[in-house]
Amino acid sequence: MSIEEIETEIKKLDLRDRAALAKWIVESLDDLSEKEVQALWAVEAERRLDEMEQGEVPEIAAKEALRRARAAIS
């Protein structure tokens, strides 16, 4: 089953079931090894870089990103 097929099936679930599934998925990540976690972050970083290179998301200067992050946790 492809990711697209899984997404289609998930969208058929009601909100409560989707939330329960999301919770289970997040909790299942705790079972990953450090190497697996690093590999997932590498894939995510590549995805985000692709989005930026394709102009799908705006670039933000590091200084601005840090300012926003600090403001969010203050």
Image: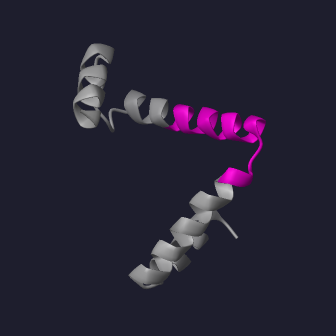
Q: Main secondary structure of the magenta part?
A: helix
Q: Residue at x 68, y 34 (%)?
A: 38
Q: Residue at x 60, y 36 (%)?
A: 41
Question: Which stretch did the figure color magenta?
Answer: 30-47
Instruction: Give the side of residue 34 with respect to residue 12, left or right.
Output: right
Residue 25 at x, y = what percent? 60, 63
Q: Is residue 29 above or below residue 35?
A: below
Nearer-the-camera pick, 33 or 56:
33
The answer to whether residue 6 is magenta is no
Residue at the top extreme?
Answer: 63
Residue 39 at x, y = what percent? 70, 36
Residue at the front extreme?
Answer: 74
Give the total of numbered labels: 0
Instruction: Work out whether residue 60 can be spotted.
Output: no
Q: How is the image coloured?
A: one colour
Nearer-the-camera pick, 14 or 71:
71
* Quarter in which the N terminus is drawn: bottom right
Q: Residue at x 29, y 35 (%)?
A: 73
Residue 4 at x, y = what percent? 56, 66
* Quarter in which the C terminus is drawn: top left
Q: Residue at x 77, y 42 (%)?
A: 33
Residue 22 at x, y = what percent? 52, 67
Instruction: Give the side of residue 1 with respect to residue 71, left or right.
Output: right
Q: Is residue 15 above or below residue 41?
A: below
Instruction: Work out whether residue 43 can be spotted.
Output: yes
